[in-house]
Image: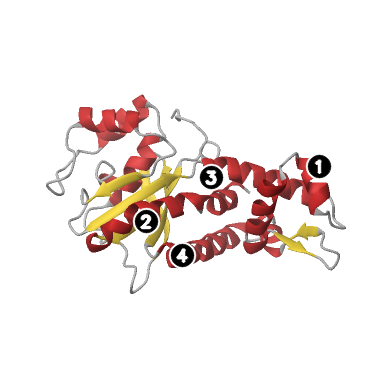
Amino acid sequence: MALMHEPTAPYHSAQDALRVLETVARHSAGVTDTELARLTGLGTERLTALLRMLRREGYVEQITDGAYVTGDTLRRLTSAHDRERALREKLQHTLDRLRDSVGAAVYISRYVDGEVRVTQYAAGPGTPAVNEWVDFRYSAHATAVGKSLLTQLDHNARRDHLSRHKMARLTSRTITSDKLLLSRLESQPPTVPVLDLQEYAIGTVCAAVPITAGSSVGCLALSLPVEHAHRLKQAADALNRSAAPVLLSLTL
């Protein structure tokens, strides 16, 4: 399966964060922000923002003299012992915080063995999850999650997926023409969230942003009741800005 790679802002943030973490890890006694700037080549403003995120996520800690050392989250995620459970717990914690900050149910989805899979999500009484009335594996053409994942594949892989899954009309807004859908996917900018405006289910709007790590295709998505549709763009932009910690966890 070939991928259509065009790095997004979260990808660049995650890559810069990895540079910082690798530098911190090489200095077991601690490294100052001044030294980090010199060693990583990152500007002060950029480095300050990354360090704030890395401290919040538990990847680095500050010791008494203000120097940075590796944090507990990084140690657990890079340990061979129970790494999968540590990663799942970390991602769930991040999703729970995202749900509260954007005021919407949020989801992580991956494209695995030619199928769409929602692997984790965070919802609540005021932020209900989408009612999966049609299996997400068979409705990629109608969901923000599915369309975001398909945009990250090449043309042949997209056609292969659509040949295996009939494009059923789920609502009056659902695209059922493979030619039209492929054209929309082709023209979708990777930096702009993919939307589902009641294409999967009446009463629900969704948005998704890519979080591709290496050869693994993934996305981060949110859903809102249609009465909150006026918040969709703002929430989607906030989700995009917050995607870097999720991508970083998946990359480590």
Mark 4 and mark 2: Cα distance apart in space: 12 Å
Tell me the distance, in whole angstroms, between the alpha carbons under discs 1 and 2: 38 Å
Give the residue at mark 4. 101
* Residue 10 badge: 3
Amino acid at the residue labelled 3:
Pro
Along the polypeptide, which appears first: circle 4 or circle 3? Answer: 3
Whole-Å distance between the Cαs marked 3 and 1?
Answer: 23 Å
28 horizontally vs 160: left or right: right
Q: Is residue 214 above or below residue 245?
A: above
Q: Which mark is residue 141?
A: none
**How many marks do you count on the picture?**
4
- Of helix, strand and loop, which one carries label 3? helix
Q: Residue 106 sits in which quadrant?
A: bottom left
Amino acid carrying label 2: it is Leu
How far apart in space, not on screen, are marks 3 and 2 (Cα)? 16 Å
Residue 38 numbered mark, or none = 1
Which comes before the other along the chain, label 4 or label 2? 4
* Residue 25, visible in the rendered structure: no
In front: 192, or 71?
A: 192
State which mark lies toward you, 3 or 1.
1
Of all residues, the one furthest to the front in this rendering is: 45
Residue flagged by tag 4: what amino acid is it? Ser
Characterize the local packing of mark 4: few (<14), some (14-19) or many (20 or more) Cα atoms within 10 angstroms.
few
Looking at the image, tell me whether mark 3 or mark 2 is earlier in sequence order: 3
Viewer-side label of 4, 2: 4
| Amino acid found under the numbered disc labelled 1 | Arg
